[in-house]
Image: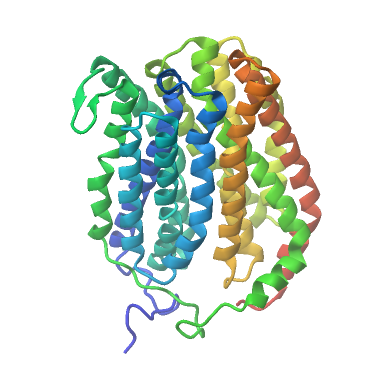
């Protein structure tokens, strides 16, 4: 008898429990949104945290991005290994509990060191979600619906950003009105500390939603024995054959990650310093910008699919390079805009090139990499551009502001340097990679399916 656990893609009926599968995506989507709220809320609290804990911009970048990024990336590798071998629901549940408790603990911090430790554990906890979530989705859906389900889940990143900025502004306004409220085991709380507690605590209950859907079982390719190992040579041979393409893609996507994460972490503080807006004012505006960029993700994917289906085999990077060329003037001008509404429009447009890089990477890997190593290759890309994008990008902005311009008011200039230079490097990398991408796809099509 064929068990649910041992079913292959060809054996599993396409209509089997799709309602349950989509509910699973909805739960994972909600958890991903929650992770982005816990991740980004600190970027809206830079001003009060600096004033309370007497931090520099470099220290702020450490707690908002660098420490989180390092531990998020490093722990993503072993947690991805664990998701292939143990209960994925329990891994996600443990991760949500950890990051929720760590976010709440940040609200009890009274020193830079305590806040830094809290953010480290937020990164460790959030590292559990993506490997297990993508694995569950891949096993729950038939091939014809897999891209749709994965794309739906990926949109949660921008929806989470939008929610963080929208609810964050409201939460900060509420906390400000209740400044000094007495918290058990803490005493009178600063508004920013109250916000961290308000954001972290709900995760302790929301984590239980992972047990409202069953584990779909692990799917294996036809003809592959259960538990068959991946040959080490598969990865080595693939990388050796495609190292130029992979290297150029890695440079381009890492640069775009640096653009995106630098803006995500520092734009709220820039708006406060340069335009004088408070979180309750800019929160809703940034939320709307993120929703628009999420829609652009779907539109870009539709265009690339059409170009590819019409024979443009390098459509993913070619279209992406076109997009960067078209929007580069907006990116270069953005931080020199004197009107806040013009800046917000530019910021929205800039996200059209900083948001979709993971979608393009995963699509290209699906076209050129053997099925047995795709997850590992994607995990490696995620590791690198998390370290460089989230870890280095915001830190470089802070270092330029503090050590080069020596003026907190020059934050916009620092952002302009990082975002513009990285966008140009990404453009050059993608254009150079075009000569290798079409050939790699053509070669893959000529090979037998793994």
How many marks on residues? 0
Is residue 127 shown left or right of residue 353? Answer: left
The quarter in which the C terminus is drawn is: bottom right
- Measured from the top left, where is residue 42 in percent x and y? 42, 30
Is residue 413 shown left or right of residue 142? Answer: right
Q: Can residue 325 be seen in this view?
A: no
Does 95 sit above or below residue 426?
below
The quarter in which the N terminus is drawn is: bottom left
Please name the residue shown 53% across and 30% down the image: 59
Is residue 10 shown left or right of residue 385? Answer: left
Does 222 sit above or below residue 88?
below
Does 402 sit above or below residue 79?
above
Please name the residue shown 37% across and 33% down the image: 163
**Quarter of the image where one finds residue 61:** top right
**Quarter of the image where one finds residue 3:** bottom left
Does 216 sit above or below residue 362?
below
- Measured from the top left, where is residue 222 in percent x and y? 50, 82
Along the line of sight, the residue nearer the viewer: 409 or 433 = 409
- Measured from the top left, where is residue 329 in percent x and y? 71, 24
Along the line of sight, the residue nearer the viewer: 337 or 186 = 186
- Measured from the top left, where is residue 251 in percent x and y? 71, 47
Q: Is residue 190 visible?
A: yes
Along the line of sight, the residue nearer the viewer: 329 or 86 = 86
**Quarter of the image where one finds residue 231:** bottom right
Coloration of the structure image: rainbow
Please name the residue shown 46% across and 25% down the image: 286
Please name the residue shown 62% across and 48% down the image: 304
């Amino acid at each position: 008898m064929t068990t649910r656990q041992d079913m292959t893609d060809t054996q599993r009926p396409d209509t089997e429990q799709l309602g349950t599968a989509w509910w699973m995506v909805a739960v994972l989507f909600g958890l991903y949104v929650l992770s982005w709220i816990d991740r980004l809320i600190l970027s809206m609290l830079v001003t009060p945290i600096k004033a309370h804990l007497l931090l520099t911009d470099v220290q702020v970048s450490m707690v908002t991005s660098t420490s989180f990024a390092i531990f998020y990336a490093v722990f993503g590798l072993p947690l991805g290994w664990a998701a292939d071998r143990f209960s994925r629901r329990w891994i996600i549940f443990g991760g949500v509990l950890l990051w929720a408790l760590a976010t709440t603990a940040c609200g009890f911090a009274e020193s830079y060191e305590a806040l830094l430790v809290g953010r480290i554990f937020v990164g460790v906890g959030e590292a559990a979600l993506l490997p297990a979530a993508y694995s569950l989705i891949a096993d729950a859906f038939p091939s014809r619906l897999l891209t749709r389900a994965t794309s739906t889940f990926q949109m949660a990143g921008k929806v989470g950003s939008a929610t963080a900025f929208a609810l964050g502004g409201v939460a900060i306004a509420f906390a400000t009105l209740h400044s000094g409220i007495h918290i058990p085991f803490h005493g009178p709380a600063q508004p920013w500390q109250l916000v961290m507690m308000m954001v972290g605590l709900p995760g302790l209950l929301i984590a239980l939603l992972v047990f409202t859907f069953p584990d779909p079982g692990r799917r294996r390719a036809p003809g592959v024995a259960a538990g068959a190992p991946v040959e080490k040579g598969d990865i080595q041979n693939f990388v050796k054959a495609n190292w130029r393409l992979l290297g150029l893609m890695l440079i381009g996507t890492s640069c775009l990650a640096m653009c995106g994460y630098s803006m995500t972490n520092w734009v709220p503080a820039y708006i406060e310093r340069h335009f004088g807006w408070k979180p309750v004012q800019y929160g809703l505006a940034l939320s709307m910008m993120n929703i628009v960029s999420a829609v652009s993700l779907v539109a870009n994917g539709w265009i690339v699919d059409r170009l590819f289906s019409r024979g443009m085999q390098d459509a993913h990077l070619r279209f992406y390079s076109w997009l960067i060329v078209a929007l580069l003037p907006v990116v270069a001008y953005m931080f020199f805009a004197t009107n806040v509404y013009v800046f917000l429009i530019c910021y929205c447009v800039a996200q059209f090139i900083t948001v979709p890089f993971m979608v393009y990477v995963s699509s290209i890997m699906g076209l050129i990499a053997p099925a047995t190593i795709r997850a590992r290759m994607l995990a490696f890309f995620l590791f690198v551009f998390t370290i460089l994008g989230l870890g280095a990008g915001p830190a470089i902005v802070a270092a330029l502001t503090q050590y080069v311009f020596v003026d907190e008011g020059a934050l916009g200039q620092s952002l302009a340097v990082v975002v513009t230079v990285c966008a140009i490097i990404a453009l050059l990398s993608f254009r150079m990679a075009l000569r290798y991408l079409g050939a790699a796809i053509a070669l893959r099509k000529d090979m037998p399916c793994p």
